[in-house]
Image: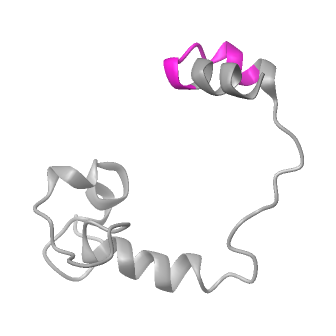
Amino acid sequence: MNYMKGKHNFYNLRYDHPRDYPKEMQGDERFWLWFQSDWYESVIMTKTHPTTEMKSIDWQHLDELDMPVTSEIISACA
């Protein structure tokens, strides 16, 4: 089922790795597909507060994830 007008399936664009598709965008390095740029401008940037200020970090939760990147973060911040 195609949820958006155009050549891509909406579900795939939301959950697949963008690098699985040929690069469509030139210039802005943040976006691989036109879909990403459109999503950013029409959904994210239309919000009053597109980001949330972080009040604290749950270090125990990060440690329990047991991922190399979180271990690096914990070591760097310690």
Q: Main secondary structure of the magenta part?
A: helix
Can you say whether 4 is above or below 30 in the image?
below
Relative to 12, say whether 41 is above or below. Answer: below
Locate residue 4: give its quadrant: bottom left
Q: Is residue 68 magenta?
A: yes
The residue under the point 74% across, 22% down is 61
Query: Where in the figure is residue 53, as x and y percent of width and height?
Result: 82, 60
Q: Indicate whether 6 appears above or below 78.
A: below
Q: Which residue is at a point 68% across and 14% down the rendered structure image?
A: 64
Residue 9 horizontal/vertical position (percent): 22, 65
Membership of 17 in magenta stretch: no
Task: Tell me if 40 is positioned left or right of 33 in this view.
Answer: right
Percent coordinates x, y for residue 24 in the rendering = 16, 73
For the C terminus, the image quarter is top right
Residue at 22%, 69% in the rendered image: 2
Q: Which residues are magenta?
A: 61-69
* Drawn side of residue 68 relative to residue 76, left or right: left
Residue extending farthest right? 55
* Colouring convention used in this rendered image of the protein: one colour
